[in-house]
Image (cartoon, rainbow, N blue to C red):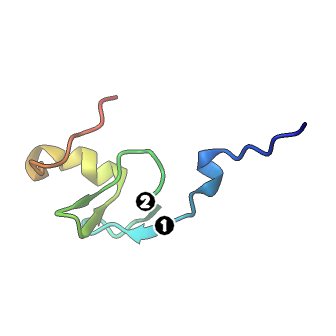
Amino acid sequence: MVFNIQNEENKKTEKIETCYTCGKKFDMNKEDGSRYRYEKFPLCAYCAEFYGFYFDDPGQKRKEK
């Protein structure tokens, strides 16, 4: 018997967003720290890490490295 098992990552599609702060295009579905600010402004991983001290949303937890 053969089972067809798909990896969860294969099911995800690319969700290309433009960073609200720096204008860089990035894939929001990657697990790299990118997030939405106030659930509507996309931030790339770099800006989310760099400005995280100033922009902390109380409802969101930062991913530990």
Q: Position of residue 41 (x, y in %)?
A: 24, 68
Secondary structure under the numbered disc 1 in the rendered image: loop
Horizontal placement of 33 versus 27: left or right? left
Q: Would you name the residue on which mark 2 appears?
A: 28
- Mark positioned earlier in the residue sequence (2 or 1): 1
Amino acid identity at mark 1: Lys
Q: Quadrant of the C terminus?
A: top left
Give the distance between the C-alpha atoms of the residues marked 2 and 1, in whole angstroms. 5 Å
Answer few, some or many: residues within 10 Å of disc 2's Cα (few below 14, many 20 plus, some between 14 and 19): many
Residue lying furthest right: 1
**Residue drawn at (26%, 44%) of the image:** 49
Q: Quadrant of the N terminus?
A: top right
Which numbered disc covers residue 15?
A: 1
**Residue drawn at (35%, 46%) of the image:** 33
Answer few, some or many: residues within 10 Å of disc 1's Cα (few below 14, many 20 plus, some between 14 and 19): few
Is there a contact, CB below 8 Å, between mark 2 and mark 1?
yes
**Residue drawn at (29%, 30%) of the image:** 64
Which numbered disc covers residue 6?
A: none
Horizontal placement of 39 versus 53: left or right? right
Secondary structure under the numbered disc 2 in the rendered image: loop
Q: Position of residue 9 (x, y in %)?
A: 60, 48
Amino acid identity at mark 2: Met
Q: Between 8 and 64, which is closer to the camera in this rendering?
A: 8
Q: Position of residue 61 (x, y in %)?
A: 21, 41
Q: Between 46 and 16, which is closer to the camera in this rendering?
A: 16
Q: Name the quadrant containing residue 40.
A: bottom left
